């Protein structure tokens, strides 16, 4: 698999997709970005700028990128397809892959949630499909800023499922570290615990670092994680360690006083000061969020196992309300969430 001539398609060149594709292209790999027309036009006109938390700033000129909004043109001949669309578009992308890609193309889901690889497999019978996990945030520049900039706002190594020899080595490039993992189910459930915070950032509108530094918000996140862990235990799901920490200890860490938390959670707080969550970005842009794939996954599990999840239900309802109102982040306080829970 370690062949730089492999044709790699980024299926869904949004924030994560553009960042991954940019890093792979900068490493000299053959990359095609399947993007919305607006993104395609920006990439073709002005190229791409990839920046990182440590201050590194790299640019790719238009002639160093290949981007298209035509699924057939992108997917035809693809040997590796990295799926980076939002979870709500998984079935749509699977249909495009089934209709246009070669049958032996390796498909890797680099999406939030725990079941996207399974949903792809169900529609791509006989094709190799691997689960993956991206641990870091990527922030896209505001509309109109050119060249398009994608900024990696936190740290971490991408994990992909074992099964294709050398794939992790091929994709492991500068700025986009990749490793194979033998238990992606555990990894995805572990990541989901942290992703429960995406909705809180969306609801408050604060930068992620500011929100996590406030114990009032961390108490709400800890409560959600407690509910999620109870549902997982009832279903015999064992989530992977998070930043070296056993998941059962995460709520205890989050509940510490602010000063002690800042000392003990340095890795968790290694975030760009302006980074927010993709769910916040969805609300700001009037797009559907991934609440059904994040909090929703826990609610389905809790309902099946009969474990209570009132806080997760409350957070889910508030995000759906914000989606319907379509005014961006509602700018809620932690007290507004907790008060509504008590009155429910």
Image: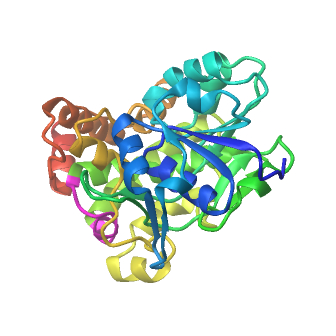
Is residue 208 on the magenta stretch? yes
Residue 161: give x, y in percent of width and height: 74, 44
Does 241 sit above or below residue 214?
Answer: above
Quadrant in which residue 237 is drawn: top right
Q: Is residue 105 left or right of residue 48?
A: right
Q: Residue at x 49, y 21 (%)?
A: 92
Q: How many marks?
A: 0
Does 217 sit above or below residue 111?
Answer: below
- Residue 288 seen in render: yes
Is residue 171 on the magenta stretch? no
Residue 245: give x, y in percent of width and height: 60, 65
Q: Is residue 106 left or right of residue 292?
A: right
Quadrant, the C terminus: top left
- Residue 115 seen in render: no
Q: Which residues are magenta?
A: 204-215
Q: Residue at x 56, y 54 (%)?
A: 20
Q: Is residue 300 left or right of residue 212?
A: right
Does 81 sit above or below residue 205?
Answer: above
Q: Nearer the viewer, residue 219 or 66?
A: 66
Q: Nearer the viewer, residue 339 or 65?
A: 65
Residue 60: give x, y in percent of width and height: 50, 62
Q: Residue at x 26, y 38 (%)?
A: 319
Q: Nearer the viewer, residue 258 or 266?
A: 266
């Amino acid at each position: 698999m370690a062949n730089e001539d492999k044709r790699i398609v980024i299926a869904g060149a949004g924030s994560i997709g553009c960042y991954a594709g940019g890093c792979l292209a900068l490493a000299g790999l053959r990359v095609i970005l399947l993007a919305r027309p607006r993104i395609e036009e920006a990439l073709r006109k002005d190229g791409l700028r990839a920046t990182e938390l440590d201050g590194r700033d790299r640019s790719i000129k238009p002639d160093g990128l290949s981007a298209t909004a035509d699924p057939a043109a992108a997917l035809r001949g693809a040997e590796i397809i990295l799926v980076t669309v939002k979870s709500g578009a998984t079935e749509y992308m699977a249909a495009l892959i089934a209709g246009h890609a070669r049958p032996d193309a390796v498909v890797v889901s680099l999406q939030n949630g725990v079941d996207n690889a399974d949903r792809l497999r169900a529609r791509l019978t006989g094709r190799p499909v691997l689960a993956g996990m991206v641990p870091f945030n990527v922030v896209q520049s505001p509309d109109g800023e050119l060249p398009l900039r994608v900024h990696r706002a936190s740290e971490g190594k991408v994990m992909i499922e074992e099964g294709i020899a050398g794939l992790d080595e091929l994709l492991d490039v500068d700025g986009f570290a990749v490793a194979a993992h033998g238990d992606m189910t555990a990894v995805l459930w572990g990541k989901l615990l942290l992703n429960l915070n995406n909705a809180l950032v969306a609801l408050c509108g604060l930068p992620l670092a500011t929100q996590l530094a406030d114990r009032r918000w961390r108490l709400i996140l800890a409560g959600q994680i407690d509910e999620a862990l109870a549902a997982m235990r009832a279903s015999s799901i064992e989530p992977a360690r998070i930043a070296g920490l056993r998941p059962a200890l995460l709520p205890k860490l989050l509940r510490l006083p602010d000063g002690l938390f800042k000392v003990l959670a340095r890795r968790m707080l290694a975030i760009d000061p302006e980074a927010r969550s993709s769910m916040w970005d969805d609300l700001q842009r009037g797009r559907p969020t991934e609440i059904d794939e994040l909090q929703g996954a826990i609610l389905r599990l809790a309902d099946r196992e009969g474990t209570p999840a009132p806080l997760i239900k409350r957070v889910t309802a508030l995000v759906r309300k914000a989606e319907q109102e379509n005014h961006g982040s509602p700018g809620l306080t932690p007290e507004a969430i907790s008060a509504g829970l008590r009155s429910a």
